[in-house]
Amino acid sequence: MTIRQLIISILLVGATASIATADRIDLRRSIRRASADTPLLLEEIARIEGEHARRFADLVVLPIDPASSDRIERIHVVDVRRMLDAAGIDWGRVDLAGGEVTVRPAIARPAEPSEPTGPGDASDRTAPVFQNTVRSADAPTSPVPDRFRSLNEASMESDGTAMSAIARQIATHWSLEGADLDEILVDIDLGPLDRLPANVATCRISILAGALTDLIHAKVEGVDSAGRHPSVLVPVKVRRLAEVPVAIAAVGAGRPIRGLGVDVAIERRPVRPSVLLDPRSLIDVRTVADRKTRRSLSPGDVLIRDLLVPAKVIKRGEEVTVESRIGGYRITYKAVATSDGLSDGRVMCRAIDGDRTAIFEARVVGPGLVELVSHAH
């Protein structure tokens, strides 16, 4: 494939995506069964869009099996495709996306508390209510020093407590389910609840945030005996479990890192959402060897770009290998860097194909290796 064909292919990929009108079935990563006594349907493990695709929403993908009711099951996209084939789906009208769905066993959740009798904000989205008299028992001593716990764990606190009510409202506010309940960690500071008047019996909760960021606030509004509505803001720190590069050995300030498996490993750790949302924050482990540290690293520290000194790994005029992935295909070809390239940075490149020249920006992967930056969607 020539450079010109490559660029045209990228543009066509973006154009095709923008005008696609096929129905879609997108498999979720993880779900929890609502009940062990009912079969699992396609609509429970996937997001379904389009009239033809919705005809198969009631397709049974996992039958009732008492022997496996307490076991984690996994449904692969290949299995789903086979079942849809047998059900007579028209693949010319439907796109199936996703990989493997982890199906967790059903659990007995506490009953939802009743709505308050006093007036409330319609935007609270059926916000839960908790009894003010149980606040003192809301925060048991946790063996985790930083007080973070999963949304799933926090929401399973005794029914009626502020901890469980706030955690469940966070899950409802962002429609979190399945693996997200275990991956998202929260540290809910219940201290502000002490500022509510003693004559407040019930409280209503709403989440004051548009995105799940590092710090969000839950508004807790009460109703006192005089009909007033005192309120406080409860701060909630948020972290998310993710596979990230972390230090596994102490590294002194200014010392080069010895690389993956020696000073660095990929581990599952709690990370600030803002770091995960910024693709430039986390270090690419392929570029970490011999990078010098700005400060000392301790085992468990998540490696972000600001902790390491940028290193020039590509020199202007140097020949580089360009990697690009289009539609599942990996394409490589040679180009020349027209600027210096820092680790985890960007570099301008020039590729010549006959009498044609292509100038483009690429992401630095490592010495002599870059990835083509495409803005097609």
Image (cartoon, rainbow, N blue to C red):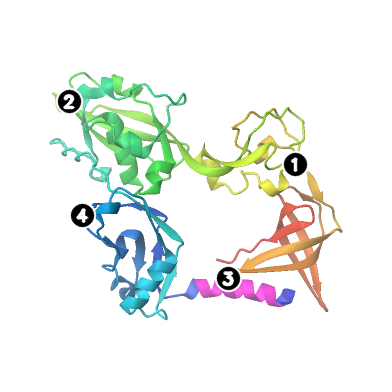
At numbered mark 3, what does the secondary structure look like: helix, strand or loop? loop
Whichever of labels 2 and 4 marks the residue nearer the N terminus, that label is 4
Frontmost residue, 7 versus 219: 7
Circle 4 is placed at which residue position? 37
Frontmost residue, 29 versus 70: 70
Residue contact between numbered discs 4 and 1, judged by CB atoms under 8 Å: no
Q: Residues within 10 Å of mark 2 (few under 14, many from 20)?
A: some
Question: What amino acid does circle 2 point to?
Answer: Ala
Q: Which residues are magenta?
A: 5-17
Circle 3 is placed at which residue position? 327
Calculate the distance from the C-alpha at mark 2 to the C-alpha at mark 4.
38 Å
Query: Of discs 4 and 1, which sits in the foreground?
Result: 4
Query: Of discs 2 and 4, which sits in the foreground?
Result: 4
Whichever of labels 4 and 1 marks the residue nearer the N terminus, that label is 4
Q: Quadrant of the N terminus?
A: bottom right
Q: Position of residue 297 (x, y in %)?
A: 66, 30
Calculate the distance from the C-alpha at mark 2 to the C-alpha at mark 3.
58 Å
Q: Residues within 10 Å of mark 1 (few under 14, many from 20)?
A: some
Q: Position of residue 164 (x, y in %)?
A: 29, 34
Query: Is 9 within the magenta?
Result: yes
Q: Residues within 10 Å of mark 4 (few under 14, many from 20)?
A: few
Calculate the distance from the C-alpha at mark 2 to the C-alpha at mark 1.
57 Å
Q: In the image, which disc is placed on residue 201?
A: 2
Frontmost residue, 89 versus 239: 89
Q: Residue furthest front?
A: 67
168 displayed left or right of 239: left
Q: Is residue 243 above or below residue 15?
A: above
192 displayed left or right of 223: right
Circle 1 is placed at which residue position? 310
At numbered mark 1, what does the secondary structure look like: helix, strand or loop? loop
Question: What amino acid does circle 1 point to?
Answer: Pro
Query: Of discs 2 and 1, which sits in the foreground?
Result: 1
